[in-house]
Image (spheres, rainbow, N blue to C red):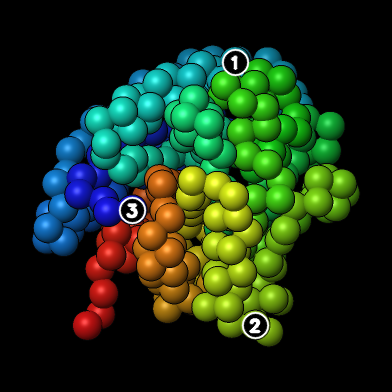
Amino acid sequence: MHVRKVSLIGVPMDLGGGRRGVDMGPSALRIAGIEDGVRALGLEYEDKGNIGVPQPESREPKHPNARFLYEIAHCCRRLRARVERVLDAGSMPIVVGGDHSIAIGTVAAVSSWHHRRGEKIGLIWFDAHGDMNTPDSTPSGNIHGMPCASVLGRGAPELVALGDRVPMVDVPNAVIVGVRDLDQYERREIRESGVTVFTMREIDMLGMNEVMKRAIAIATDGTAGFHLSFDLDGVDPTVAPGVGTPVPGGANFRESHLVMENAHESGKLLSLEVTEINPILDVKNCTAQVAVQLVLSALGKRIL
Ligand SMILES: [Mn+2]
């Protein structure tokens, strides 16, 4: 896969988490210089602007076990349409959050687009959390803890059926990497689903390079390629402090870049998403700067 052009789509989504601030993520990433960085790699770049998202203060969450379900589903449908138009134009979508619930719209788009061509896609989900809750297992009702389950066909029908294909990704082609914080009933959901998880313990024992080789093998087995959904909270908070839900013991700076470098080298990266940047909790926008460098590694930036 030879990427010549990338298209950025911002999603200032702050309905899926319990803490405000990640709606400023798309601005933070633009301010940190994503456009100049991509152009310096010799790629074409276009900014498709932001998807409109209502402010949480202006709405009632309604569903206690899936807060703002209708609003999130609506935004994800609009995101799906915009991502599909980018794919139609032969460009690589880079979706910038916003909380991680936006992945339901992104994955719906990439899955549906390939489904129409008789292809399926794989998924690599980089995250401190599993994001494998359903409305039945969630302790908080926050949908940003449910998107991975949703794209694998588990959870609220309004989210699960957002693409043309259910599930959007088959469990044997999905991998979660970087996990170190799971909810009590989420563990049961993960075991029942059968999804492959490389926790921080496996990363410690095998090394990130080996983990990514295995993850890419799973995500590309019989697929057109894979979507990489990258939650900045998977990175250690000493490197990326400005995230919605920081958890100690994450991937260090180089391990995080190895995720991206391996994704690029595979030649099978279909689309990329970075989520959960929270400028309110950040230090002089350093987390967005880290995110820009990570995106550039995924697009082929090399040390030498
Ligand atoms: Mn997440």
User: Sequence order check: which comes first, mark 1 or mark 3?
Assistant: 3
For disc 1, the neighbor class at 10 Å (few under 14, some 14 to 19, many from 20) is: some
**Given the image, on which type of amino acid does mark 3 rest?**
Met
User: Sequence order check: which comes first, mark 1 or mark 2?
Assistant: 1
Residue annotated with mark 2:
206
**Residue 277, how many percent across, how many down?**
42, 50
Above or below: residue 191 compared with residue 159: below
Above or below: residue 169 compared with residue 79: below
Q: Residue at x 59, y 50 (%)?
A: 222
Q: How many numbered discs, if any?
A: 3
Check contact, mark 1 vs mark 3: CB within 8 A: no
Residue annotated with mark 3:
1
**CA distance for labels 2 and 3:** 28 Å
Between residues 96 and 122, which one lies in front from this camera angle?
122
User: Sequence order check: which comes first, mark 2 or mark 3?
Assistant: 3
Name the quarter where the C terminus is drawn.
Answer: bottom left
Front position among marks 2 and 3: 3
Residue annotated with mark 1:
70
Asked if the residue at label 2 sits under 8 Å from ligand 1, the reply is: no
Q: Is residue 290 visible?
A: no
The image quadrant of residue 134 is top right
Q: Residue at x 64, y 51 (%)?
A: 174
**Residue 113, how many percent across, how many down?**
45, 29
For disc 2, the neighbor class at 10 Å (few under 14, some 14 to 19, many from 20) is: few
